Every structure is written in C-alpha cells, then in structure tokens.
Image: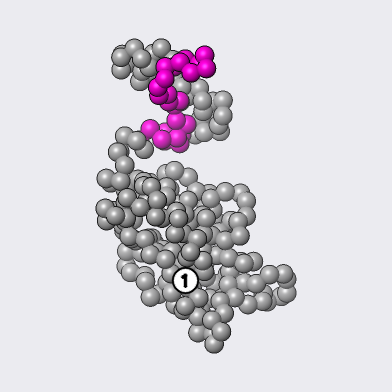
C-alpha cells in the first residue's frame, strides 16, 4: 500500500511515523508513506495557499490551485482521495478494514478556517474522526493511517486485531499478566485454569458485559 498525505506541516509526522508498528511496517515494505507540502505547488509569487473568504468572515481559506495540482501530480487509477473534515463520515473500525484493502490512499489535511468548497470535487471520500474541531487534518491523518497500517497483512498477527474492540460491535475483553496477585487484586481463576473452552466463553461474556456497561449503543447494532 502507498499513502500520500498533503499537509502544510510535514514535520508534525516525524515522530509518529518513525516509531513502533508504523516504522516497522515501512521498514518491511508493507507500506510506503509520503508527505507532500502543497505550499510547494503554489503558483503565487509568495507561495500563498490561502486567501480571505468571499462574503466576508474571520480566518483564511485554503485555495484550490495548490491542492488540485498536488493531487493531480500523484494520483493514479488506483488512488482514493480522502478529505479530512469535521463534517465528513464518522470514522469507524469497519472503514479502517475497508481502506486497508486499497492500493493507494491520498489524504488532504485542511488547515486555517477551512478550504474552498470546490476542493471537495476531487475527493472520493470525506472522513471525520469525531465530533470536535482540530486546528488541522494532520492529527486525523495520523490516527487513520495508524488504524489502517496495523491491519495490513504481516504487520501484526491477524488474531491480534480480530479480537479488537468494535469487531462484531463489541468492546475487547479484559486482559491480565503476571503477577497473579497485585495489591490484593487477583487474576480471574478461569484464565489460569488451562481450560481453553471456558476461557473463550469467559472472554465472550466479558466482551458483551463490558459493551453493555460502557457502550450500549453498540449492542443495538
């Protein structure tokens, strides 16, 4: 898979993409991630990428030309262009699975007050990671990239994400490790019984119970 990210602040990604699972996936050629500062595509003498909004109002709006030209320079027939915006489709785990099957993703990170509405015309999908507003799409693109890369074949063990929270509309079951007793708190006896059938039943019950307590809206699905 290849992921291209259009951003005015490529330095923001250095720590995130050079650590942990994403770095390992890059080193193993499971994914190629490229950052594009679309200011470099501006034809303005001063490399401006924003301007005041028609009709008045506060803030500055990203202009079409740099983003259109940047996307055009990297887009292929396999590309899916994604705009990160608060009014996009709410991001869910199933969407992460769907996007992990794509060959080429292009993320457009907005910034400032917003972007020219015509930029939507070159996008295949608009995504929001939550009902709140960030200063730009950079953090959202990091979140989505992380959630996708871990699902690529060979990046982590498949079983590790098959039991993730939100699979089957359930949260994950509780996990424990050594020591068996800590500050008087004991590991549930069933987990040390060696009876794998009972352990599987326990974990299933815990997923349902935890979801009922914390996210009853998921059970309705």
The residue depicted at 65 percent of the width and 72 percent of the height is 60
The colour style of the image is one colour
Residue in the image at 56% along x and 84% along y = 46
User: On the rendered structure, is 110 left or right of 178?
Assistant: right
Q: Nearer the viewer, residue 52 or 46?
A: 46
**As displayed, is residue 77 above or below residue 101?**
below
**For residue 197, what is the image quadrant?**
top left
Q: Position of residue 91 (x, y in %)?
A: 50, 48
Q: Quadrant of residue 62?
A: bottom right
Residue 148 visible? The answer is no
Q: Quick check: 87 above or below 108?
A: above
**Are there few (<14), some (14-19), or many (20+) residues within 10 Å of tag 1?**
some
| Residue highlighted by disc 1 | 37
Q: Secondary structure at mark 1?
A: strand
Which residue is found at the position 72% from the left and 69% from the top? 58
What are the residue bounds of the magenta stretch?
A: 162-187
Residue 168 percent coordinates (x, y):
42, 33
Q: Nearer the viewer, residue 3 or 167?
A: 3
């Amino acid at each position: 898979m290849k992921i291209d990210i259009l951003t005015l602040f490529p330095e923001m990604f250095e720590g995130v993409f050079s650590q942990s699972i994403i770095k390992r996936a890059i080193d193993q050629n499971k994914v190629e991630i490229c950052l594009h500062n679309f200011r470099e595509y501006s034809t303005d003498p001063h490399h401006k990428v924003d301007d005041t909004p028609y009709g008045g109002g506060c803030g500055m709006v990203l202009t079409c030309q740099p983003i259109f030209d940047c996307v055009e320079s990297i887009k292929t027939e396999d590309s899916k262009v994604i705009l990160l915006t608060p009014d996009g489709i709410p991001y869910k785990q199933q969407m992460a699975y769907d996007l992990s099957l794509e060959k080429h993703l292009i993320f457009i990170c907005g910034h400032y007050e917003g972007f020219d509405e015509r930029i939507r015309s070159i996008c295949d999908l608009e995504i929001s990671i939550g009902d709140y507003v960030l200063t730009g799409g950079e953090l959202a693109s990091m979140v989505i990239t992380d959630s996708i890369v871990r699902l690529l074949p060979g990046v982590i063990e498949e079983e590790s994400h098959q039991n993730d929270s939100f699979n089957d509309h359930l949260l994950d079951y509780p996990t424990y490790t050594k020591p068996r007793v800590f500050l008087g708190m004991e590991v549930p006896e069933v987990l040390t019984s060696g009876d794998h059938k009972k352990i599987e039943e326990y974990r299933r019950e815990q997923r349902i119970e935890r979801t009922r307590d914390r996210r009853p809206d998921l059970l309705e699905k």
